Amino acid sequence: MPKIIVLPNEQLCPDGAMIDATPGISICDALLENGIEIEHACEKSCACTTCHVVVREGLESLDPADELEEDMLDKAWGLEPASRLSCQAIVRDQDLVVEIPKYTINLASEHH
């Protein structure tokens, strides 16, 4: 079973974490199932960027982002070449190291 190593995030996972992930599940679902409350304002429908993560290791094991995900990622805070929407990135058979950015853009919670 692949592992997801979550780098420390001041608010969501201050000490970091190492979790088991079932192949075929999204990174977002794996985090949520293990008590890491990553935002997912659009309920994982690829309509926002609140679940943005940076895959520091294991990116090559994920299917490439599709056009819709790429379009949404263009709006993410702190976009990097290894950025993915965790609701769209499906865990395969390789361990991953992910970083949850310090900030997210959530227009609903920011009263826009």
Image: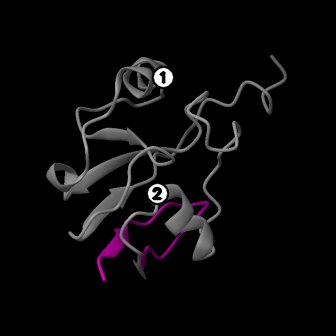
For disc 2, the neighbor class at 10 Å (few under 14, some 14 to 19, many from 20) is many
- Secondary-structure class at tag 2: loop
Residue 57 position by quadrant: bottom left
Label 1: how many Cα within 10 Å (few below 14, some 14–19, many 20+): some
Q: Name the residue rendered at 69%, 36% in the picture.
A: 42
Image: magenta residue range: 1-18
Q: Is 17 located above or below residue 43 in the figure?
A: below
Q: Quadrant of residue 99?
A: bottom left
* Vertical placement of residue 44 versus 93, above or below: above
Residue 4 drawn at (x, y percent): 35, 71
- Residue 5: x percent and y percent? 34, 72
Badge 1 is on which residue? 72
Q: Main secondary structure of the magenta part?
A: loop
The residue that mark 2 highlights is 26
Residue 58 marker: none
Give amino acid for label 2. Answer: Ser
The amino acid type, in three-letter code, at marker 1 is Met
Q: Nearer the viewer, mark 2 or mark 1?
A: 2
CA–CA distance between discs 2 and 1? 17 Å
Residue 14: say if magenta: yes
